[in-house]
Image (tube, grey):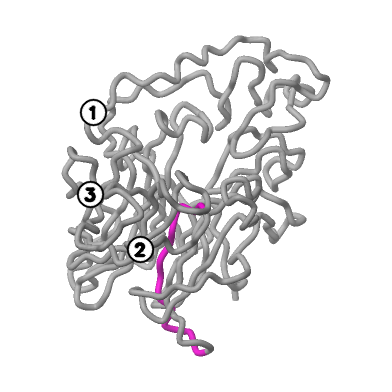
Amino acid sequence: VVRGDDKRWHLYAARMVGGCGLKTWTTNSEIIHAVGTEVDGPYTVDPTPVFQTFSHNPTIQLVDPGKRRYVLGMIGCGGGSKTPRDGCSNGTTCNTTWCWSPSDPASADSAPTNLGNVGGLANENKKGERRMANGDAVNDAKVVGAGGGGCDTPHWTGLATTEGSPDGPWTVVTPKVGGGVQVDCSTAAACWHTPSITNPSIWPLVNGSVFMAYSTGCPNCSVSPGHKHIGIAFGLAATGPFVDVTPAAPIFPFASEDPAIWYDTTNSISNESWHLFSHTDYSGVAENNTWTHVSAHAVATSPWGPWRVVPDPPYTRTVTWASHPPTSLQTRERPQVLFEDGTPVALSNGAQPGNNSSPWYPDGYTGDWSFTLVQRLKPRA
């Protein structure tokens, strides 16, 4: 989310086509644009996608105030070669035993009591029965895509640019072959990762150069080997090329992804004004029980490091609503800090209630239905 010269907030988000849920992200995800006059909404969604399937994980940043140049980071180029899954209902992915729908009288009795972790769907309903809520079978084989192309895949990370307004149009500037954005650490004595990265988050400097936080697998890390970890790269331009500034070790010693790098000009408490937020697995499984929170926070006096991991997470799974009792989310991913005139004013996340209550569905049981959560750091005046 970024604020434009038109004083509107421009939100770029991933939407699952076909009324499907987050479990279908590798086939059904497209990138959409919405605008609002307040940072926490309401937002009006443009029905035409900015990038069709497959595209995912958009992050937007103003990188050149003079030219009003914006950069959009994403996974997948929207080539349209994926075959989206169908047979979904109300933003929830059906499986062969259950499909949730608030308009179906039987769905209340058929809602599973335990959805598991990170979008998992249980095979039994409240009565212990194994059946669909509406009695219809759903063909899970329709998940299979129809080819991928060089960039129409979760393994391709790219950047797009536009000038004048965050409305677009957008031009993909990353080559659509060769794996997308790469981070070079060939000149380092040792490097903890391969050049391919994902989850780019860019922070610009006044001279036009940028720092980019990223995540990628760490095959030899002592904690969470093979899982994603986070590093930082430097580029003379917002579109690269990028050179690693953390080749020796990742920022967090445990598994982490979805970084958000930002600089706080309002900090008068400490000289550690560089910040990095990340998503982590609150169960602690991926982190070998060294970290059991849904998020992590690191700070530094310079983006070149050293970075210090803050003992407490920046946010939790609990959300306090203005018109609803506090609820707990099943997942809270993709953190991004939103700014107005250089001041951080809100936090956005990709959120999934799962079987927890929410203002929209107080009884819970929403499967892999997800939404974009924007939470102000301070209440409205």
If the image is split into quadrants, where does the C terminus sit? bottom right
If the image is split into quadrants, where does the N terminus sit? bottom left
- Is 297 placed above or below 111 here? below
Mark 2, secondary structure of its residue:
loop
Task: Look at the image and say whether residue 196 sits in the magenta stretch.
Answer: no
- Is 20 placed above or below 42 here? above
Q: Residue at x 23, y 44 (%)?
A: 180
Q: CA distance from mark 1 to mark 3?
A: 20 Å
Q: Which mark is residue 261?
A: none
Q: Which residues are magenta?
A: 255-268
Of the image marks 3 and 2, the number of the one nearer the N terminus: 3
Residue 146 position by quadrant: top left
Q: Which residue is mark 2?
A: 248
Q: Which mark is residue 149?
A: 1
Q: Which residue is mark 3?
A: 170
Q: Nearer the viewer, residue 8 or 257?
A: 257
The amino acid type of the residue labelled 2 equals Ala
Q: CA distance from mark 2 to mark 1?
A: 33 Å
Tag 3–tag 2 contact (CB < 8 Å): no
Camera-side mark, 1 or 3: 1
The amino acid type of the residue labelled 3 equals Trp
Q: Residue at x 74, y 21 (%)?
A: 124
Residue 71 position by quadrant: bottom left
Q: Residue at x 61, y 63 (%)?
A: 315
Tag 2–tag 1 contact (CB < 8 Å): no
The amino acid type of the residue labelled 1 equals Gly
Where residue 234 appears, as percent x and y from the top left, is 26, 66
Mark 3, secondary structure of its residue:
loop
